Amino acid sequence: MVREYLVNNPDVLREALEALQTRTDAQRRHRAESDPRDFAIGPSDAAITVVEFFDYRCPYCMAALPWVQDLVQTRHDVRVVFKEMPLSIHGQPALEATQASIAAMPQGRYWQFHQALMSFHGDLTPARIDQLARQSGIDVARMRRAMNDAAITRLINENEGLAADLGATGTPAFLINGHLVSGFDPEGLQARLRQAADEARTRRATTGR
């Protein structure tokens, strides 16, 4: 009877699939925006949340750094969430830099260290990572002790899986209020930010919040 009903009313099945996709997308967005293990800058109730998936050896991520810094410094309606995703093509330096930045997060100097790593364009050796950490005010010995924690590997793997679920195949990838912008496309990113701000204003006018 159910099969016959669905055959005779295919729109019901289509609506159910669309509802399922909407719910799945919302769950993925929540996972991307709300993982307490990630570093974030900006008000927790910001109208716009920008999630960046990045790799410290990705040249396009490096190029995007000034854009991200400008967001942090000038947009008080934006919260930026940083999701580490070292790509295998960039080898051990990318992975080790990621492990170091996550391991150092409890020391409260993540943003300084992140900028130092992302700004460095030379050979990112273990000694150089330690130097950049030290210059960022990080206790290097404490950082090194924490780097092999299985929780760090688990977080990196989960970030990779989430990025794949969202359709992000490389870095950088930006999720702006649930909408994916792949690569560093300044015009596309600014257009999506304007759209997100317009949507937020419309929502406030309609709901009062």
Image (cartoon, helix red, strand yellow):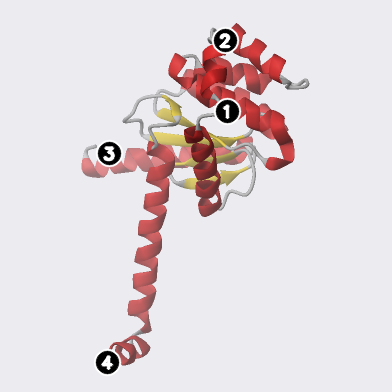
Dot 3: element: helix
Q: Is residue 66 left or right of residue 92?
A: left
**Image quadrant where one finds the N terminus:** bottom left
* Numbered tag placed on residue 1 in the rendering: 4
Tell me the crowding category of disc 4: few under 14, some 14 to 19, or many 20 or more residues within 10 angstroms, Cα based. Answer: few
Residue 96, percent from left and from top: 64, 28
Tell me the crowding category of disc 2: few under 14, some 14 to 19, or many 20 or more residues within 10 angstroms, Cα based. Answer: some
Residue corresponding to mark 3: 204
Q: Amino acid at mark 4?
A: Met
Give the spatial CA distance, label 4 vs label 2: 67 Å
Residue corresponding to mark 1: 99
**Residue depicted at 66% across the width and 17% down the height:** 129
Tell me the crowding category of disc 1: few under 14, some 14 to 19, or many 20 or more residues within 10 angstroms, Cα based. Answer: many
Mark in the foreground, 1 or 3: 1
Q: Amino acid at mark 3?
A: Arg
Give the spatial CA distance, label 2 vs label 1: 16 Å
Q: Are marks 2 and 3 in contact (CB under 8 Å)?
A: no
**Residue depicted at 32% across the width and 42% down the height:** 202
Residue corresponding to mark 2: 136
Q: Is residue 31 above or below residue 132?
A: below
Mark in the foreground, 3 or 4: 4
Specify whether residue 190 is in view: no
Give the spatial CA distance, label 3 vs label 4: 45 Å
Mark in the foreground, 1 or 4: 1
Dot 1: element: helix
- Disc with the residue nearer the chain's start (3 vs 4): 4
Mark in the foreground, 2 or 1: 1
Give the spatial CA distance, label 1 vs label 3: 40 Å
